[in-house]
Image (tube, rainbow, N blue to C red):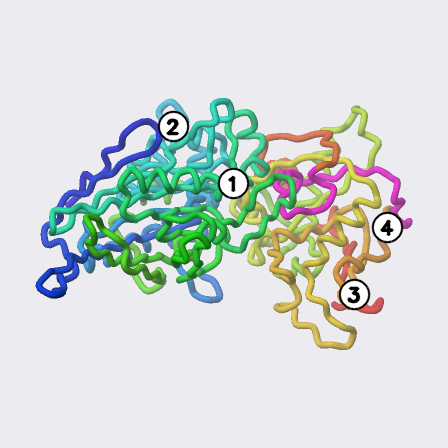
């Protein structure tokens, strides 16, 4: 039976949100133990958590136009999560559960893109966002804001917020003028026990301070994003003083303590474990952002010595976290006796037909959209070897970017500077077939909503940029067999943080230590002049400091636009009609050892 348990107090900029859960028929509590004639009251409940859903409702890959699969045979989507949630609610008693999320909800698939850009939810009579429809139907209680929530601009985010039956939380997303919360900082949930003594559960939402850099164009002058530890230290004591028996943090922030934007902000990107360590009064943290699986991770709080339980379910709805809480009634209040965490795998269940039926029309619309033919290709191209070879399909991205920047600078002060371009292999399974090319083929090359900029760098700075990028490779001595599957991702560098440069030629000697790998760096056949200036066509994530590459964030910006690179590629293919790799592809960089090519 549907539950009316979301009676929110105040606006999104108010101090918080409250959700009340009434007594459930057959609500379960642990049996009361007897101690010297006194019965100990015990109550158990479960908080379920997802994160980094990234627009996944169905177990479907819109870029391949077939059911999602990976090497580990994971499944994705809220329809799968819904089945797991239903199972947990049946086992625990629905009113003894809460369901929360840790952010990055409305960006990532063509389904979410379609309802932000093609048939936008912000239109006068626009549709309801599929993620709002699905999450409302499943019965989410709260969700933290992720950094990708801001990719489409604040109006889209506000409309999504309006369409959700649950609060979007962000205690460290502040109005730039007033420094007051721009969204609800927390939500309070009341679970009614068989003893007539409610348990009050506070969920504090924290988002990523990197938003100020990565989505600067959308948030500058409108919102600011201070550090997670600072805001948690401010809000957790307030929540306790308001009567919270249990405090859970939903943090769109990894647990590693690292940052990808270097020293550009005085805050830590992946700060969840630091929050647990430094801020007393927290019982558990649902971790997001890092796209890693952490079933249970315990951090000792420095002030109290208490163990704080962290858990991060795998991205896209591949896992569901369960925090199991056991409480005892002691000295006139409920106290947490024990917390444990684990994850459930969504590939163990079928999709919930209620969710797939609810969103069937939206799904079909998007499938039709992505299968529109926009041109043809004279040859098949694949990203499979892109991380360690100069392949034509990555050259295509850079060629389109360089052409776009050259056209934009024509006739201006920087028109005479050579234009280079950077590109990354975002997916090792993307490709363009020989013959007809569809929107999904082109869009698959660029799954992110990055836009294009032009920055000026010197030859010396470009060499340092390439040396930094080349950290990506595992050092491999000459003569040692090379396994491509184990050659990359050194220092935990993901594929999207390895840049290849287009417009220059160079070699990367992987037998050398990181920082001393780039040789034979040339432009138009001549050694690159360290003092010469070049324009680099670069995506806004990299230009704003994402990945912490040297020089680029402080380099002079000479042009930028708001069009997604993905759409620029689609428009280029439409205009050309035919993709001919002979017009843009060449092998300009290669891996070597002692001068000998690795491949």
Tell me the tag on residue 13: 2
Callouts 3 and 2 close, C-beta under 8 Å: no
> Which range is magenta?
526-553
Q: 404 or 453: which is nearer to us?
A: 453
Q: Nearer the viewer, mark 1 or mark 3?
A: 1
Magenta span has 542?
Answer: yes
Disc 4 target residue: 522
Dot 2 falls on a residue whose secondary structure is loop
- Closer to the chain start, of discs 3 and 4, is 3
Q: Nearer the viewer, mark 3 or mark 2?
A: 2
**Position of 539 relative to 178 (above/below):** below
The residue carrying pointer 1 sits among few (fewer than 14), some (14 to 19) or many (20 or more) residues within 10 Å by Cα, namely: many
Dot 3 falls on a residue whose secondary structure is loop
Q: Which residue lies at the image location 37% right of the left edge and 44% below the top edge?
A: 364
The residue carrying pointer 3 sits among few (fewer than 14), some (14 to 19) or many (20 or more) residues within 10 Å by Cα, namely: some
Q: Nearer the viewer, mark 3 or mark 4?
A: 3
Task: Give the CA distance from mark 3 to mark 2.
Answer: 53 Å
- Closer to the chain start, of discs 4 and 1, is 1
Disc 3 target residue: 512
* Image location of residue 243, percent across then percent down: 26, 41
């Amino acid at each position: 039976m549907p539950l009316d348990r979301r009676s929110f107090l105040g606006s999104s900029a108010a101090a918080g949100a409250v959700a009340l859960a009434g007594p459930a028929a057959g609500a379960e509590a642990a049996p009361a133990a007897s101690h010297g004639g006194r019965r100990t009251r015990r109550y158990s409940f479960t908080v379920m958590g997802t994160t980094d859903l990234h627009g996944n409702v169905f177990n479907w890959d819109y870029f391949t136009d077939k059911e999602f699969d990976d090497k580990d045979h994971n499944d994705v989507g809220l329809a799968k999560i819904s089945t797991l949630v239903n199972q947990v609610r049946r086992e625990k008693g629905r009113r003894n559960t809460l369901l929360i999320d840790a952010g990055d909800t409305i960006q990532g698939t063509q389904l979410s893109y379609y309802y932000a850009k093609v048939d936008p939810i912000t239109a006068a009579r626009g549709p309801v966002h599929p993620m709002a429809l699905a999450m409302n139907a499943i019965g989410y209680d709260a969700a933290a804001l992720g950094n990708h929530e801001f990719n489409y601009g604040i109006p889209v985010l506000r409309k999504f917020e309006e369409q959700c039956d649950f609060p979007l939380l962000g205690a460290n997303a502040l109005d730039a003028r007033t420094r007051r919360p721009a969204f609800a900082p927390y939500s309070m949930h009341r679970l009614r026990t068989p003893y007539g003594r409610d348990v009050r559960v506070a969920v504090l939402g924290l988002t990523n301070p990197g938003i100020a850099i990565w989505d600067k164009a959308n948030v500058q002058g409108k919102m600011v994003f201070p550090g997670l530890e600072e805001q948690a230290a401010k809000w957790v004591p307030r929540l306790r003083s308001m009567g919270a028996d249990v405090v859970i943090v939903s943090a769109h922030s990894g647990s590693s303590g690292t940052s990808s934007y270097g020293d550009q902000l005085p805050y830590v990107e992946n700060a969840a474990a630091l929050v647990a360590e430094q801020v007393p009064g927290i019982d558990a943290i649902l971790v997001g952002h890092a796209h890693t699986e952490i079933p249970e991770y315990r951090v000792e709080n420095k002030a109290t010595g208490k163990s704080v339980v962290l858990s991060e379910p795998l991205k896209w709805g591949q896992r569901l976290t369960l925090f199991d809480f056991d409480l005892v009634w002691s000295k006139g209040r409920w106290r947490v006796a024990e917390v444990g965490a684990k994850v459930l795998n969504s590939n163990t269940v079928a999709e919930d037909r209620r969710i797939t039926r609810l969103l069937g029309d939206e799904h079909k619309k998007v499938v039709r959209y992505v299968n529109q033919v926009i041109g043809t290709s004279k040859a098949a191209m694949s990203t499979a070897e892109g991380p360690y070879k100069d392949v034509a399909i990555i050259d295509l991205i850079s060629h389109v970017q360089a052409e776009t920047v050259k056209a934009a600078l024509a006739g201006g002060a920087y028109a005479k500077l050579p234009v280079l371009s950077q590109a990354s292999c975002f997916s090792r399974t993307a490709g363009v077939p020989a013959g007809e090319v569809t929107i999904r083929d082109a869009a698959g090359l660029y799954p992110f909503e990055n836009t294009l900029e032009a920055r000026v760098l010197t030859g010396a700075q470009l060499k340092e940029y390439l040396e930094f990028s080349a950290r990506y490779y595992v050092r491999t001595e000459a003569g040692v067999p090379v396994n491509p599957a184990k050659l990359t991702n050194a220092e935990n560098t993901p594929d999207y943080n390895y840049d290849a440069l287009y417009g220059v030629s160079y070699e990367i000697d992987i037998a050398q230590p990181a920082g001393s790998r780039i040789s034979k760096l040339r432009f138009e056949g001549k050694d690159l002049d360290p003092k010469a200036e070049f324009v680099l066509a670069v995506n806004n994530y990299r230009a704003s400091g994402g990945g912490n590459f040297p020089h680029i964030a402080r380099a002079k910006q000479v042009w930028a636009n708001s069009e997604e690179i993905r759409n620029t590629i689609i428009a280029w293919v439409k205009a050309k009609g035919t993709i001919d790799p002979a017009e843009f592809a060449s092998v300009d960089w290669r891996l070597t050892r002692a001068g000998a090519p690795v491949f």
